[in-house]
């Protein structure tokens, strides 16, 4: 499935990136990324960068809310990581994205949790960009390969 097929819905006025069809298509070329969409709710999705023998399969962007069934997402991620001989699966959570259901499922499946700080620099006159609680940040901002 292509990233362009994802159904996106607004994030309650939070600052977010890659939230339209054009930027999803540009940001996540099909040959480098996998896209998973819930069969029950097309607004629940996940986009991950393919792994390799020197890289993790890396979840870059997702919209998974509530206590929906996370196991199908994890099962596909693990299968794809194994097929691509990836080092494993990496899923970074930032700020208040620390959804309790997601963390609980990750712990049950053996994910390790490591605290990490990312330093972001903004040059703006817009107050909303200077408030971390207004951001919706994912690894989509940090996983470019050159």
Image: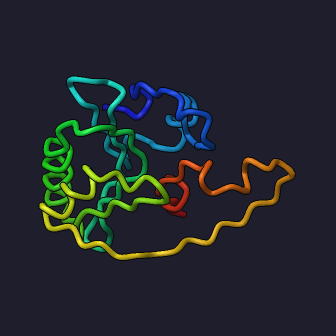
Number of disc labels? 0
The spot of residue 52 in percent (x, y) is 28, 65
Q: Nearer the viewer, residue 91 or 126?
A: 126
User: Horizontally, is 75 left or right of 52 in the view?
Assistant: left
Residue 126 drawn above or below residue 91: above
Image quadrant assignment for residue 59: bottom left
View extreme (right): residue: 125
Please name the colour scheme applied to the rendered image: rainbow
The spot of residue 21 in percent (x, y) is 52, 28
Q: Nearer the viewer, residue 129 or 27?
A: 129
Residue 145 drawn above or below residue 114: above
The spot of residue 53 in percent (x, y) is 25, 71
Image quadrant assignment for residue 44: top left
Image quadrant assignment for residue 67: top left
The spot of residue 18 in percent (x, y) is 55, 40
Image point (56%, 33%), residue name: 12
Q: Nearer the viewer, residue 107 or 33?
A: 107
Residue 76 drawn above or below residue 4: below
Image point (41%, 25%), residue name: 7
Question: Looking at the rendering, in which quadrant would you find the N terminus?
Answer: top left
Residue 43 drawn above or below residue 83: above
Image point (54%, 63%), residue name: 146
Image point (72%, 66%), residue name: 121
């Amino acid at each position: 499935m292509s990233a362009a097929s994802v159904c996106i819905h607004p994030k309650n006025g939070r600052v977010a990136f890659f939230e339209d069809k054009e930027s999803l298509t540009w940001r996540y070329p099909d040959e480098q990324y996998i896209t998973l969409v819930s069969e029950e709710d097309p607004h629940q999705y996940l986009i991950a960068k393919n792994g390799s023998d020197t890289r993790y399969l890396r979840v870059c962007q997702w919209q998974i809310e509530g206590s929906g069934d996370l196991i199908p997402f994890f099962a596909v991620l693990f299968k794809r990581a194994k097929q691509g001989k990836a080092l494993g699966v990496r899923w970074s959570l930032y700020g208040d994205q620390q959804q309790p259901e997601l963390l609980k499922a990750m712990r049950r499946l053996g994910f390790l949790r490591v605290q990490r700080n990312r330093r972001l620099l903004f040059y703006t006159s817009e107050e909303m960009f200077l408030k971390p609680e207004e951001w919706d940040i994912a690894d989509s901002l940090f996983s470019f390969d050159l």
